[in-house]
Each structure stands twice: as C-alpha cells, then as structure tokens.
Amino acid sequence: MVLQDFYSGNEWRAYEYFGAHPEKQGVRFTVYAPGAYKVTVFGEFSMWHDIELSCRGRGGIYSGIVPDAKVGQMYKYRIYHHDGSVTDKADPYGFGMELRPCSASVIRDLRTFSFTDAEWMTNTDKGYNRPMNIYEIHFGSWKLNGDRWYRYEEMADTLIPYLKEMGYTHVEIMPLQEHPLDESWGYQCTGFFAPTARYGDCNGLQSFINQCHMEGIGVILDFVMVHFAVDDYGLSLFDGTPLYEPEDSERARSEWGSYYFNYGRGEVASFLKSSANYWLSEYHIDALRFDAVSNLIYRGGREENGINEQAISFIKSLNEGLKKRHPHVILIAEDSTNYLKVTAPVAYGGLGFDYKWDLGFMHDIFYFFGQPPEKRRECYSLLHFSMHYFYNELYLLAFSHDEVVHGKKTILDKMYGTYEEKFAQCRTLFLYMMTHPGKKLSFMGNEIGQFREWEEYRPQDFEVLENFPMHRSFERFCRDLNRIYLTYPALYEGEYNSACYSAVAEDKAWDLVYAFTRTAGGGRIFAVFNFGNVCYENYSFRLQGNHLLKELINTASDIYGGNENCQSEEIPVRNGWCSMRLEAYSGHLYEII
C-alpha cells in the first residue's frame, strides 16, 4: 500500500495492509489510530493480556506480529487516550467478528477458498439488454433450517433451485456486513469487511456466491456506506477523536441515530473505497445496491439542507474507480430525490450509477391500487406518469422490503377490496410491473401472496401454499409471468430506448383501461389492463396493420385463482382494429404476430 494514497483517499486495497493477516512468523496486526497515545492488541493468543503495537512514524499507524496468534482466534485493540482513558475496539478492517452480542474480531484467512466461476465472471455484464429479475431476501428470515438459520453454504442448496424454478436471474441480499442489532436488518454496521457471523464465516459466503454463479444466478449485496452504528466497540470516536465521523457534532448524527461518515477525510474515503472493492474482489459480488443515496446527495437527506459536496465528490470518485477495476459490476442507487444524472457517467456530469430505484413509480402505483374504482378515475394519470420521466435515468422497479413493514401492509394487502379482489388486483399489478420498462425487483414473500408483514425474526409463510389454494395459484401465476419475462426479448431489450414503448390507450380514465406495446429483439408485445370492476365484452383497440394476437397470460384465468375458464386465444387485428373481452380487475398479455 502506498501510504500517500491512503491519506489522500485514493487507496482501494487498504484491507490488504490493515487488519489481521496470517504470515509465516505469525499474524500481523495493523490499525490506524492517529489520535491514540498507545495501542495494544489482545486476544485468545495472549490470554487476553495486552501486547503493545509499534507506531510507524508520525502517521498514526500501529503494527506488530504476534507469533502465537492463529486463524480462528478472537482479538480486540485497546486504545489508550491522552487523557488516560481506555477503550476496547473491534478491528475496523477485521474479516470476521463474534456473533452478537459479543463484539470481538476474529482472525480469518480469505485465501483458503478457491472460486470456480471464471466463466461466469468473464461473461457477466451490466445487463442493459438482458432480463434482470431480482429476488430480494433477508438471509435470516427467508426460511429456517429446522430451528436455526441456514449457514451461507447451506443456503445454496435450498435457495438456488427455488430461484431457478421461479424465474429469477439475481438474488439481492440485505446487508451482510456485521451488525449488532437484528432489528436494524444490517443497515447499522460495525464490521465493514466482516460477513455477519449469524450465518457463518467468509469462506462460507464465498462458497454460496460461487455456487450461485455456477448455476447462473447473479448476487447483489445491499451495501451500506452512508452511516455506521454508534456502539462503543465500533468506529465511533475510534481513537478518542472523531476519526470516521464528522468533527461537527451537529452534522455527525443521522436520522437513524447513527454516525455519518466524514467523506472529506482521505483515510475515510480509502476505508470505504476499500470496503466496496473488497466485496467485489474477494467475494465476486456482481452488484452493489447503495442504501440511502439521498443522504449522500443532500445533507441529512433533505434538499432544503443543500448539496453535500464532499459526499458527491466521493461517490463520483468511488463509482468511477469501481468501474475501472470491475467493468462488469452493476452499481445501483436507492435514491428518492429528483437529483439529475444519477445514472449518467461521471465524465458527463453524472454520479456514475448504472441503475436507480424508481421509488416514484412504486409509490404512485401502490396509491392507485389502494383506491376503490370510482376514486381511481381521479388518479388515472398515475398509471402513465412514470413514462413522462422514465427515460431521464436508467430505472429499476422495486417492490422492496421497505414496503411490507411498519404498518404499510404487504403488497397483497395494499390492494383494495375483498380477499378475492385483492388477489385479482395483485396479479394485475404484477403483470403491469413486469411489462413496464425497467429492471425488476421483488421482496421475498411477494410471490406467494404474503398477508403478514415481514418480521426479521420469522421465516416467510410458505405453509400457505399447502393450506390455501389461492396462494398456491398466485405463486403459479408469478412463476409463469417471470418465465414469460425471461422468454420474450421485447420485455427487456431496448427498454431504455423510448422508441421501444408505445402507448395504445392512456386516455381511458372513465373506463379504467390502459394499454401499450413493447417492441424489441425482433418481437412485439401488447399489454392490456382493466383496472376497474366492470367487465367489457368487446373492448376495441387500434393497432397498425393486420396481425394476430397470441395470448401469453391472462390474470383472470382460473388456473391463477380467477373466475375465467380461459383457453389460450388468438385475436385477429384487421385494418388496425381488434376487440377483446376484458374481465374486471384483469390484465392480458399478447404476442403480436
């Protein structure tokens, strides 16, 4: 490591220098604590007695080799302050940690696992013209292995077949960086280089990702770099001074009670850049989803507080540097602001992300589906409002974990109406989402019609598939819909080209009918929706030319829990006109031949 790069914020592999590293003579411990009076390391190898580390020059770097230390042993640093006080700290660059509530770091060796996914790593890309159907999970509450969590390597045998059977291309995992509190879901981290010990160790996670790649599944990691937990063994006041957090105490605290990072400090920038690079390099992660990007763009995440110039500069440098080192890696922003060019290249004044969550689409569509039919006429424009701004960014449509907790209700339960009406409308909602331009993401449980809000300590209610036919039919619908999405290039190729989308009916507010075509990959798709509770026997649409409409899926079919005994039908288009039956609360998808 070049020390000047570390101090100036241009170091990307600081984890190879700092932390605990096995060597021939023992384990070398290196930690950065410029404000400390003295630093020691202690652990199982010393019967928890101090071993003083040497300070290298004036840069605040403390280091030393401990001959008796071994992989798998626990340790901490003891920071002696100039005022005589002492704090014990976990290793900021530690590759492993104890299971909460304990907080010691654990010596790990990343070099013992050998990946076999070279073909995948060579051929994967950013997926602009490929299908991207993401299944978001919380690792500890998807399913349980008996009465315990699955270990990383064990999860592969259960999760991967499910992803392939259901038609998902990627799995996005909520934060796996070590964190002390289950209820934080991983978003308040203490170990930015340590996979959480809840599910195993670094080699187990490497094995899980390798197995995903061998089966054609991409892995996205939810990555936290906006803030960190305030626990005293973590980064907060690490050497007795504000080292990782801003010196201005009024601006240091986030809305979650955690500390923001000080992006203007070079050592902090190198820490975060190295963390991002670490997960991509050492674990072969395919994509990073950056949490709470609005808090990077604006101070405190609020536009009225002004632009966070230091954070903006940092995120541009981070994204640009990651793309140079990992050209295939996908960078995704969870951003709720109207800030321009989030997905534009840094060279053209953008932030350099590859995709941005379209939270506006999500909020609008959930509001619409929560209204009774007579009220939907007043907000019909919400159906197509997203297409007025869609081509400003590269959007990803997400029905995420945030939308099924804290009294918001699950996706199914957000729908207006009776039990049967909720299912009918949820099928139509998912057809609309899957045919709307943009990559897709859905949280675990959405695909089985989960009625209970998600709780991080309980597995999903997969037993409903055995006990309630409507849920089983809904899962079949989601599986068939996902497979259609993967099969027809018109649903994913050229989706960020406005020429590939054309509205056919977007002025039918009274009828609550909406329709559009998607054209790409040599094919053409026609999507039709009736968002009202009135059935139309012969509803007419105008399409250019003479064609045949081959039905691909009908949300009202009895095989999906609807009332229609639907056979796959073909509808002629003559002289540019066609007509069809539109059941209440239904969606229809056709291939135009």
Image (spheres, rainbow, N blue to C red):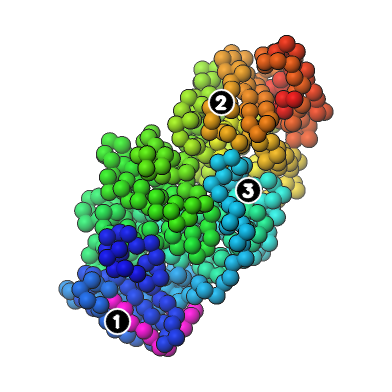
Q: Quadrant of residue 265?
A: bottom left
Marks 2/3: CA–CA distance: 26 Å
Q: How far from the left and from the top, in percent, is residue 66?
A: 38, 85
Q: Quadrant of residue 371?
A: top right
Q: Mark 1 or mark 2: name the one nearer the start of the chain.
A: 1
Q: Answer above or below: position of 562 versus 75.
A: above
Which numbered disc, 2 or 3, marks the residue that appears first in the sequence?
3
User: What label does residue 53 carry, if any?
Assistant: 1
Image location of residue 556, percent across then percent down = 73, 28
Residue 3 shows in this picture: yes
3D distance between C-alphas at marks 1 and 2 = 64 Å
- Left or right: residue 84 versus residue 124 is left
Q: Residues within 10 Å of mark 2 (few under 14, many from 20)?
A: few
The spot of residue 455 in percent (x, y) is: 54, 51
In the image: residue 306, left or right of residue 325: left
Closer to the camera: disc 2 or disc 3? 2
> Identity of the amino acid at label 3?
Thr
Q: Within 10 Å of the Cα at label 3, are there few (<14), some (14-19), or many (20+) other Cα atoms?
A: many
Q: Nearer the viewer, residue 271 or 82?
A: 271
Instruction: Say which residue label 3 marks.
Output: 169
Question: What residue is shown at x 63% (from left), y 53% (from top)?
Answer: 217
Separation of marks 3 and 1 at Cα, in angstroms: 48 Å
Q: Is residue 265 left or right of residue 221?
A: left
Give the residue type that dot 1 points to.
Leu
Q: Which residue extends farthest left?
A: 83
Badge number at residue 499: 2
Q: Residue at x 52, y 39 (%)?
A: 396
Relative height, residue 555 to residue 208 (above, below): above
Residue 71 lies in the magenta stretch: yes
| Part of the protein shown in magenta | 62-74
